[in-house]
Amino acid sequence: MKALVTRRSMRAMILMLASTVTGCVVGGGYDSGASVDYGVGFYEPYGYEYGGWGPGYGVGPPRRGYERGDRGDGHGAPHPAYRPAAPSRSMPSLPSHSRGR
Amino acid sequence: MVRKAPVHEPVIYTALMTRRGYMKAMNVALSVAMSVALSAALSAALSVALSAAMLSDVAAASLVLPPLVQPASNEHHDGKVIWVDLVTPDIAGAKHFYGELFGWRFDDIHGGHDDYSIASLDGIPVGGLVQRALQPGEQHQPAWLTFISVRDVAAAERSIIAHGGQTLMAPRNYANRGRQGVFADPQGAVFAVLQSSSGDPPDVLAAPGEWIWSSVMARDADQDAAFYQDVFGYEVFENPATDGATHLVLSSDQYARASLNSFPADAAKRHPHWLNFVRVTSAADSAARAVALGGRLLVAPFTDRHGGQVAVVADPAGAPFGLLEWSETADQAGGQSDGQQGAK
């Protein structure tokens, strides 16, 4: 009987322990890196795609004074969700001076 | 006489009707009591272990990062990308790849459970490498995590949440580094904010081999621009577009900080993200070199609006980054005509 009790106890204990541990697992699409010190161990959701890039698909920085688009300046374009920079503001660019090393 | 229990009667009642049943019931009760006691004991032990793990997590000081700026300065540039961390399953492979491609050197920092390495070029820190195991078959994207400068991480977090973003890693303090947290914008692009305790790097033109530019790839560029403007206070400029996509420029301190672009096509199938660019003297040569070192070409070099070539590659573990040419002489010429030359 003692052996039987022990076996059942062990089974029940394993089930409860498994459910406890499962409850500790963080869900979602990111690796939480829960047991590390730095914590910035975020793998992002898989599947970046870059098809469709090419001439015309401009992602780089503009040159200073580069022509601005006219969206949101009251010429019939739909008002964007953001607040466009004032029309008097010229297109910004990257810093032009180097570190000088 | 043994009473045969109807099927629907509770087993415990039936069991109590016989000595054997009584023993069986006692057996079950004892079994339950023991398992509860054992589970309680194990739960307590597990709690202690988890608490210890959390304490070690809180004691992030065990991984001591160098200050962002040495010597410390009072410079601060809201909204500027001031740091990047590569999260990779193969830190040794990453060191070889980026060392060969850009001439970066690496200083390992040991602390806690982490393998962390600071990459530098000519003594200037350019980013961090974090080793994180990726299980076979696990589909996660190794990536460069973008850190944006803020003056107050707590205020930034409140603003991010209020405008539809979410916290992925709650803000924490790191000795010498400052306070930082990891978040996702409303469309899912992951970024970090950093309140540097040593000030921000100065606004200078990146040298070849340094990070020079950042882009956000979004499903809805308008909505995403509103989010980043509300959180970081960016000025938003629109670029003329000929491809049907939306191309915006986020600016602070009168410098362009990042572009924000809608996906060129199939937006629903793509995951929004930040993409950072290293300045190179030849995007074509660097892209070919990246492939020779085990990387992958994602976007073949093409001439962008600034007149230089741009390409996108992935390192051998799959982390994407951009290669961008930037001519100082063209910039010094500057002005509208220069910009129009850049617009293809």
Image: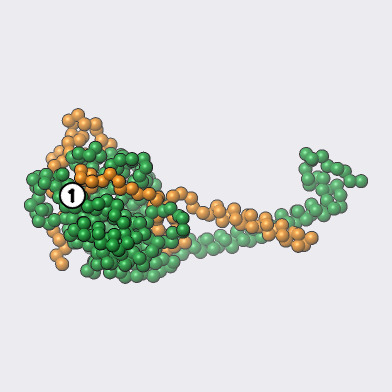
User: Residue at point 28% right, 44% down?
Assistant: A52
Quarter of the view holding residue B116: bottom left
Q: Residue at x 78, y 47 (%)?
A: B12
Is A48 situated left or right of B247 in this image? Answer: right
Give the vertical position of B64 relative to B14 (above or below).
Answer: below
Work out whether residue A37 can be spotted.
yes
Horizontal and vertical percent position of residue B308: 16, 52
Q: Nearer the viewer, residue B38 or B239?
A: B239
Label 1: chain? B
Q: Which residue is mark 1?
A: B303
Chain ID, orange in image: A
Q: Residue at x 25, y 35 (%)?
A: A80
Instruction: Judge whether residue A94 can be spotted in this image.
Output: no
Question: Residue B343, position in %: x, y?
Answer: 15, 44
Instruction: Characterize the local packing of mark 1: few (<14), some (14-19) or many (20 or more) Cα atoms within 10 angstroms.
Output: many
Chain coloured green in this rendering: B
Q: Position of residue B93 (x, y in %)?
A: 35, 65
Which one is nearer the viewer's eye here, B257 or B159? B257
Residue A8, position as x, y percentages in the image: 71, 57
* Residue found at x 24% / y 67%: B103
Q: Nearer the viewer, residue B163 or B7?
A: B7
Left or right, residue B79 beside residue A43: left
Left or right for A71, reference B1? left
Query: Which of these two is toward me, B66 or B267?
Result: B267
